[in-house]
Amino acid sequence: MIKRMTKTLGGKEIEVEQKLIPVGQLSFYLDNPRLYSTFDRSLGDPTQEEIEEKLIKLEDVKMLRASIVANGGLHEPLVVRDGDFVVLEGNRRLAAYKSLSKESPGEWGRVKCTIYPHDISEDDIFRLLAQYHINGPKPWAPFEQAGVIYRRIEKGQGTVDSVSKELGLTPHRVKTYYEVYQAMVDHDELVSERWSYWVEFLTSRSLKKHRAKNPKLEKAFAAKLKSGEITDAQKEVRGMSKALAKVDEEEGVELVMDFIADKIGIGDLVEIAENTDLDLINRFERFRQLSGSRDTRRQIQRMDDEEDGRVRLRSEINRIKINLDNLLRRL
C-alpha cells in the first residue's frame, strides 16, 4: 500500500510517498556524515559492500538489529531518494535490515521507506538531515556536525552566515566548527576522537595569541598529538593554555619556542600551569628545604664512588649559585 503526504523543507511543500521497498534495491548514502567520518576518504570512496561490512560490526547497529526483531520492524521509515533509491537518512538501520534480510529474506526482505523526489536538491537534503540530526531528536556528534558544515561551505553551497541561518545555530558556532574541522583536514587529523583536542587548542585565547605570533606552534601541536605525547584534552591542552596565560609575554614566547623545538613537552607546560599558583616565596622555601635536607646530604655522600655524578651535580649547583646571585642583585 502506498501512502502519499507532504513534507515541509525550506519553506516549501514537497510531495513524498511511503511504501515498502525491497532491501536489495537500497543503497547507502556516501555523504552521510556518520559514514563520512567512519571511512578514510583519502583512500577513495568505500564500496557498498565495505560500508555494510563496517556498519554491521558497530555496537549500535547490533542493538538496532535486535530492536527491529523485537518490534517486528522499524518505528521510523528510512528516508530514500527516488530513482537511485539512496537512503538519505537511516543508513545504520539499513545495515541492520540488510543483515536480517540475508538470514530471512521472506520476513525482512522489504522495509518501510519515505520516498522523496529523484530531483530533490542538495540544499533540501542538507535541510532534511539538519532537521533530524542538528536541530532534531537525534543529534550528530559535534565532529560530524562540523563535517557537514565544512563540506557545505567548501562546496560553495553556503557561507558561515547562510549556514547558521539554515541550521538555527549562531554564526560563532558555525565559524568555530568550520575552522576546527579545517585544521583537522590540514593536518590529516580527521579522527573523531581528536575533535576535543583541536577544539581546546584552537579556541583558547592564550594559544590563539601565540599561534598568531608563531605559526609553527600549530604544526608542533599536531605532531605531538599524532605521536601520542598528548593524550588528555582537558588536562594537557587546557594546562598548556593555562601555563601560557599565566606567565609574562616574554616567557610565554620562550616556552612556545622550546615546545616547538622539543626542548620541553606538554607535561612540562602542565606542571608550569599547576605550579604558577604557588607563591614565589613558597617555591624558594621548598628549594631551600630540599637543598638543606639530611636526605640530600645523604644522597651526596652516596655519590663518593660516582665521579661523573659528582661533577655533574657540582656543575648544576654552580649554575644555581650564579642564578641566585643575579636574583639577589635585583632585590
Image: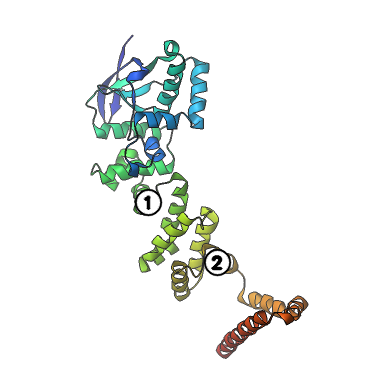
Query: Which residue, given by chain and number where applicable, does mark 2 sit on?
Result: 268
* Residue 53 visible in the snapshot: yes
| Location of the N terminus (image quadrant) | top left
Instruction: List the residue tagged with mark 1.
Output: 188
The x and y percentages for residue 105 are 42, 13
Residue placed most toward the observer, 168 or 163: 163
- Looking at the image, residue 16 sits to the left or right of residue 289; the answer is left
Which of labels 1 and 2 is toward the front?
1
Against 206, residue 11 (above or below) is above
> In x, y percent, where is residue 71?
50, 16
**SS state under label 2:** helix
Quarter in which the C terminus is drawn? bottom right
The image quarter in which residue 85 lies: top left
Q: Is residue 33 above or below residue 63?
A: below
User: What label sits on residue 79 in the rendered view?
Assistant: none
Identity of the residue furthest to the top in this view: 1
Residue 24: percent from left, percent from top: 35, 19
Mark nearer the N terminus (1 vs 2) = 1
Whether residue 204 is visible here, answered yes or no, is no
Q: Residue at x 33, y 22 (%)?
A: 26
Residue 328, given in percent of the width and then of the height, sits at 59, 88
Residue name at image x 46 percent, y 16 percent: 103
- What residue is drawn where x is 24% and y is 41%? 157
Q: Rounded to the nearest whole Å, what is the CA distance between mark 1 and mark 2?
A: 26 Å
The residue depicted at 43 percent of the width and 72 percent of the height is 253
Question: In the picture, residue 32 is in which quadrant?
Answer: top left
Q: Is residue 320 left or right of residue 20?
A: right
Q: Amino acid at mark 1?
A: Asp
Check disc 2 and give the amino acid type: Asp
